[in-house]
């Protein structure tokens, strides 16, 4: 009796399995257009969301003012129209936000660059002033040394003149004494 039940159960299982496979195949065949449409829709939506993300990314990764101006120009060239379908308003919001952020970033970058340039100019002027001060100090020291040398030379020359005059006087006296003695 058990073996008969097992046989009947095996037959029912085989029919159930065959019915399940045919229903699954039928389900897949009937669902295929919906699945293909869902995949195409996902791809379309992903395309739009990627484009919106690209618009948002234009205002990130700050750089110099020239790079930011290039990004602003790119953002302004993006055309938001009916081709964006239901994402048109989101895309317009992203573009407006990006343009505003880039405008602010450009102003800040230009201000920062101007401040850096001014700071560099002041540093350069300070370095030139220090160099000129150093040159002036060296020139003053050289002039002072030259003046001291000149004074020493004048004193030496005066001393030599006095010595020469004294020698001349001594020779003159000696000559006078010799003339008197002779």
Image (cartoon, helix red, strand yellow):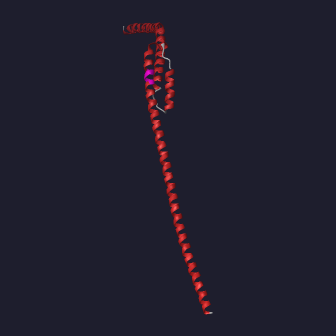
Quarter of the image containing the N terminus?
top left
Left or right: 170, with 20 as reference point: right
Q: Position of residue 102 (x, y in %)?
A: 45, 27
Q: Residue at x 49, y 49 (%)?
A: 127
Quick one: which residue is furthest to the left in this view? 1
Quick one: which residue is furthest to the bottom in this view? 182
Camera-side residue of 104 and 150: 150
95 magenta-colored: yes
172 magenta-colored: no
Camera-side residue of 113 and 126: 126
Would you identify the image quadrant in which residue 19 lies?
A: top left
Quarter of the image containing the C terminus?
bottom right
Q: Main structural element of the magenta stretch: helix, strand or loop?
A: helix
Q: Residue at x 47, y 36 (%)?
A: 114
**Above or below 171: residue 18:** above
How many labels, in total? 0
Q: Position of residue 90 (x, y in %)?
A: 43, 17
Q: Residue at x 53, y 70 (%)?
A: 152
**Residues in magenta?**
94-99
* Residue 28 visible here: no
Camera-side residue of 136 and 123: 136
Q: Position of residue 81 (x, y in %)?
A: 48, 14
Q: Position of residue 101 (x, y in %)?
A: 43, 26
Camera-side residue of 34 and 135: 135
* Residue 145 visible here: yes
Q: Residue at x 46, y 26 (%)?
A: 57
**Above or below 109: residue 23:** above
């Amino acid at each position: 009796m058990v073996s008969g039940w097992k046989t009947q159960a095996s037959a029912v299982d085989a029919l159930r399995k065959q019915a399940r496979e045919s229903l699954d195949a039928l389900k897949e065949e009937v669902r295929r257009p919906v699945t293909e449409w869902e995949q195409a829709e996902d791809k379309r939506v992903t395309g739009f969301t990627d484009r919106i993300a690209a618009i948002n990314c234009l205002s990130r990764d700050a750089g110099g003012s020239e790079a930011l101006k290039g990004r602003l120009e790119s953002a302004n060239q993006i055309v938001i129209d009916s081709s964006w379908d239901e994402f048109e308003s989101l895309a317009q919001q992203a573009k407006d936000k990006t343009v505003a952020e880039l405008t602010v970033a450009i102003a800040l970058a230009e201000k920062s660059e101007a401040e850096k340039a001014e700071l560099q100019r002041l540093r350069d002027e300070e370095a030139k002033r220090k160099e000129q001060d150093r040159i002036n100090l060296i020139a003053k020291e050289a002039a002072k040394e030259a003046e001291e040398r000149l004074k020493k030379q004048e004193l030496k020359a005066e001393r030599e003149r006095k010595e020469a005059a004294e020698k001349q006087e001594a020779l003159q006296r000696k000559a006078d004494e010799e003339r008197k003695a002779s």
